[in-house]
Structure formats: C-alpha cells, structure tokens
Image (tube, rainbow, N blue to C red):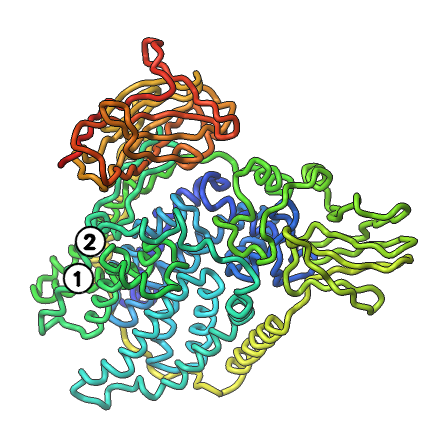
Amino acid sequence: MNKIFNKFDPGLLIVIVATTLAAWPFLSQSSLPTGTDAEIHIFRAFQIERSITEGVFYPRWAPDFYYGNGYPIFNYYAPLAYHLAAYYSLVTSLGVVAGSKFVLILAAYVGSIGMYMFVANRWGRVEAMVSGVAWCFSPYIFFLEPHARGEIAESLAIGISPVIFWAFDKVRASGTKYSVVIAALSLGAVVLSHPLTALVAYGFLLVFLLWEFWITPLTLVDRSRNRSSSNLYAVGVAILLGLGLSALYWLPAGFERDAVRMDYYGIGHYDFRRHFIDLTELIAPAIWSDSGAAFPVFRFSLGSIQVSLGMLGVATVFNRRIRRFDTLLMTLGLFGATYMMTSASQGLWEMIPPMRYFQFPMRFLGSAALAIVPLCGMSMRWVALTKSKWLAALAPAVAIGLLVWAAMPLMYPQKWSEFGEVSSARFHSEELQGKWFGTTCCHDFLPVDVEFIPPPDPFITEQFLRNEKQIEKFDKGSFPAGTVVEVIESRTQSDLLRISSEEPFDLKLFRFYFPGWEASSGGEDFPIEITEPDGRILIDLPSGEYELLLEMTATPVRGLANAISLTSVIVVVLILWTNWFRSSTGASKSIGPIAASSLTITAIVLVLGIGLKIVAGNKGWFQYHSSGRNVHVAENSMFASVANEIELLGYDAGDTLIDPGESLDIVLYWKADVIPTRNYQVYLHLRGEDGELWGQSDKVNPASFPTSRWSTDKYVRDEHVITVASDAPAGTYQVHVGLWDHVTGERFLSFDSNGWLLGESIPVPAKYTIKQ
C-alpha cells in the first residue's frame, strides 16, 4: 500500500483538493465581480489582446486610456498576467474576463503545489501536506488578494513565489539542466508578474541561497555531506537567465523611469504611514462577512491557525532532537516581514526613499506567508518525540482540520453578477464618469510632458461610444482649407494616415507623446514636437499627397532589453539540448511516504470540511445577514434620511475619550433608499457644545465609492478619521455629518425617522470627551 501511496503522492492530492475548496468561488461562479481592482486588470488584458491580434506580441502602449490619448503602462507595469489572460481568451474564445479568472485559479494551484514540493524536498511529505494546506488557506492569498482587492497580477506573483524556492533549492542540491531551466523560468515569471512582489521574493531567495551555501555548511559535522557549493555556478546561471528572460520588462522600466510621472507615490491615501498593521490584527482570526454589505470587511491577518502552528514550528529551534538550522532562517524571515508591516519599522521605511513605491506595508504578507507556512509544516516534528503512531496519524489531520475551520468565514465571498461587455466603449464611458483614468491610481506612468489631462474631445468620444475600430485621433479644426486627413488603418501601436494638402500644416494628434513614437513617409522621417501643456504629438507636415506612418518603435534601451531576453531564450534552449549541465544526479533523494492511517484520517477530515462548507453555505453559517434598515455589524443603530435618497443607519463611535491633537475614528453605515441621482460628497464636523468646529473629515465619495453606483440592497461602510485641533479645550463634543454637492455647493437637508427636519447635518448621538 505504501508503494502505491509513494508513487501517486497522495499528500499532494490532499493539497490539490484543499486548493480546489479554497478556489471554489471562482470555479463555481461565472464571470468576475466589478467594484475591485479586477476591473482595471481586465481592461488591461483587453488592450494586450488587441495588440496580440495585430501581431504585436509585447506592446508597451495602451491606446484607449486617458480619453483615447493612451499611455505607456505596459512599459512599466509587469504584463505577464494580462498576456496569460489574453492568450487564454484567444485560445478558448471565452474572453478576457474568463482569462483573468483563469490566472487567479492558476495562481492558487501553482502556489499550493509549489509550496508542497519545496517543503517535501527539504523536510518531508507530512510537513509538506500541512504546509500546502496552510498556504492555500492563508487569508491574504486565497481571499484578500483575489476577492477583496481583486489583485490579479499580484496574486499570480505570490503564487509563483513558492515555485522559485523549490526550483532554486533543486538547483542548489542537484544542479541539473532541468532544475536550472525551471528556476530561471520561475524567476523570470515572477518579475514579469508583479515587480514589488518579485523584489521581496527575490530578496528572500538571495538570503535563502546565501544561508544554504555559507551558513548551513558550518553546522555540518561531516563537511563532505555538503555538495551545495559545487552547484553555486548553476545557481548563478539560473539567476542570470531569470533576470535575462525578464529584461524586456525591467530594463526599460528602470532606465526610462524619468520619461513618466511617478511623483504621486507616497502621497495621501498612498502614504505608507497610513497603512501599517497592528500586531493584534496580524494574528487575529477572520471576520465573518455580511451578505448585506456592499464590500467585505476583512483583517490583514496571517491566519490565527497559521500563526499558532508557525509558533510551534519556531519552537523546534530550541529542541536538540528535532532542531533544523533552516528553521531559524524561516523564523528570521517571518519576524522580518512582520516587522516591516508594523509601525515599528516606520523609521526604516523613511530611511529608504524607494520604499514609498510599496505604498502598502501589507504587501509583505506574501513574504511572511513564504516563511510561516513551512514553519506550520515543521510543527509536525513535535510528534516524533512522542513515538506514538496514533498521535502521528492524528496530528496532520487535526492541523488541516483547524486550518479549514478557521478559513470558513472567508469561503463565502458575495455572489457577483456578470461582469458585462469588455470594450473600448465601456472603458471610455467609465472614464467620462470619472470612475478612473488610465487604470492607475495617481496618474502614475503618465508621460512626463503631460502637465494636465486634457478634456475629452466630443468627436473622439462619439467614435469610442459607437465602438468603432478605426478612430480618427487628430485635430481637424486646425487644418488649412482643402486639407484632408484620412485614417487608412488605426492600430494599437501605430496609425497609418493618408494626407492631402495644398500647403504645409501642423498635424496635432490626440495621442500623448512618449519616447519611441516616430513619424515617417516613404522612408523620410518627420520630427515630432510636443504640445504644451497637454503633452500631445505635433508633426510639421509638407504639402502634397502621401501616406504618413506614426508608430511606436523600440528605443535603444528597449532594443537592448529585447536582445537580452531573446539571447536568454536561446541559452535556455541550448541548456536543454546540450550537456552544459548534467541531465540527472543518479539516485534521487528518498522522501519517506505518509503513513496510510494518517492519509486516511486527513482525507476524512478534508471531506468533512467540504461537507461543512456546503451545509454552511446553504444555512448561511459563518456570515451575518443584514437586511432592510438593520445593519448587524454596526455597534450603534440610528436613522436619518438625506435628500430622500440616502439613509444613515448606524455608526461605530470608537474611543470617545481623546486628548487634544489626537485622532478619533468613527465608522458610518449608509444605504441608498433609491438609486442616487448624483454623486454626493460627505463631511464630518467635530463641534463643541457652542457649535464651534474643532476637527473635520471630508471625502469625495462616502465609503470611497461613488453614490451613483450604490445599489438599494447593500449598505456601505464609511470609515473616517478626525484629527482634533491641538488647542481644543476640555469638554464634550459631537460629530455632525452631512452630504453636499461639490459642483453646486448645495448642502442637502436631513430628516429623522419621524420626518422631522434635522437641518443640513446629522448629529451623531455619540458624545466625545476632550481631556485636559
């Protein structure tokens, strides 16, 4: 029986089944939700797909964003997730929404399997089985990134990260050509998926390799057992190849950084100082979701069971019989990542200016998972001290059962409707509504010459909304009399125009300029000027009849990057076809099988977990179900109606005893009674008993979500922070809430549950005391 288990690796099967359970919302529901960053990732994939169908397999320009002016997002934002989604769409004809979902599902399985292989190769299959399940149920990995935030690219990078460690560990141990190639491909893939995640994973990988090559050998009694140093050359080749394969992305992104705007990083909401995580939140259990909420409330947690098992793994360092030196490395990695997420590290963040590009300290949750999940597996080592077969059989099942139980509240993301049509017309329409510009948060990657975003041109807007393929992106109003400019072909990375003019003229194109744009006719190049202050392309054209080609070409840096990546591909092929590295190491390392009794009990526990999920889903367990005017999660209920459209149903007062100069936190719960007719703005005023203002909070959108998009069956949770004036006198204060229109300046009247007028603002019942 054990031979069969060893051949089919049932421990890996347990991990795959658990991953299926974790990914079930994506597997069981069609489409993807709107209202998260998944929307912008889908639109990016759509732009990539268009370019691929035109024969441009690595586009750097997204042509439809910023009212059709376009911008070079793909020169700076790692595009692998969008390429995978686009090719899936082209192969299956299912569209980029299905392709984007495929990427999320792929990331889930790749990550769990990669973690299983990494831990099994180093510590054993029992430890790997527990680690694989701990990975697939890590809150950040299976819920926060793919569901709550919709971060498709980052989810892919996190999923690839364990594969990197497994592959490089194989290179270090064996140095075979296959391990070298897999290591290079996985490293290149994570860089092409998400640069910030790649940077953290790559740093951790280098520390891991240095540890294995120079620290671990010092702990070996028999130095002849360490063969790692002989494979240092193979590891170096794999790293260089991985960086070379991804050079077509990172080299231009780095050396052409000054060609785009990145000055908004670290400002306002994207200031890392505002997003440090409290240690208690990192170790807290999951919050139950509310089916009546428009958006889920969640914690940035490592997972309470993952933390418990991880600490048991850390404790093995202190026992001589089960101690492993690499456990110390994982422990240091966990504590380092945890430190970077808490406010204790603020000084370090401020000391290193590039850290502002990370924006959110919670990005280190991925690297923390890379460290704590193997430690979860190491917790199983304590069972060896007991020498009890039954305890050895039960321990993995108990650990996996606890992991499944703790993940239950996160297994029920809200049902989503169909994403809808993905088209240039839809995106252009959403830009007109002010939903976003260019799919980035702060106009980052906008060409540096664009000093302000020009308003949409009515003629171009009309073409986009008709979903036309050939769009005229030029200023007809500036043409001399008798001049005709016709579009022969408009493509994502080029325009071919037919020019007919009796006199020279300036052709202003509604495309932002970016290095690489070139204009030519019949082999003759025309110089491009840049308009001010809108940063568009202006070409001084001669009279006559001719065809003008405007196309995005490779700059010297991009040409070099492409050559490096192509050379790296050739080297990979040569490695596979030659004996540059040995093809095998002979007898492979023997990894003991998992006992049949342990597998049987674990399988039963996992089946019970699947059954619990099904029953809980039907019964509504592990969730709250607010409806009507009841908000179950609100600490305090109240009622006020604003403009007969929006209702305030409750609030969380937070700490009501405050010192001058400190901040108070307050949460409001709003709900639309009817579909709002406008986008309201919200203000909160902290007033003393005499009505004087001593602090306030303002938002363009309550809950940071335009009110015109609110539904009538879901409430929204609106968080505010009010900083109390430093000279506020001691006394009792109250928060007053109001909605207004920033365009007209109108403040809207509020009414209580009896229809009595409250005025232009709503007094929140909570009383705040300012201390001396």
Look at the image and tell me whether residue 711 can be seen.
yes
Distance of mark 1 from mark 2, alpha carbons? 9 Å
The residue pinned by badge 2 equals: 399
Task: Name the residue located 65 percent from the left edge and 47 percent from the top edge.
Answer: 68
Residue 550, picture quadrant:
bottom right
Of the residues shown, which amino acid type is indicated by label 2?
Ala
Of the residues shown, which amino acid type is indicated by label 1?
Ser
| Above or below: residue 130 compared with residue 205 | above
The residue pinned by badge 1 equals: 379
Tag 2 secondary structure = helix
Q: Are marks 1 and 2 in contact (CB under 8 Å)?
A: yes
Label 2: few (<14), some or many (≥20) within 10 Å? many
Task: Name the residue located 58 percent from the left edge and 48 percent from the top edge.
Answer: 452
Horizontal and vertical percent position of residue 324: 18, 73
In this view, the residue in front, 568 or 254, is 254
Horizontal and vertical percent position of residue 99: 53, 50
Left or right: 511 in relation to 762: right
In this view, the residue in front, 728 or 699, is 728
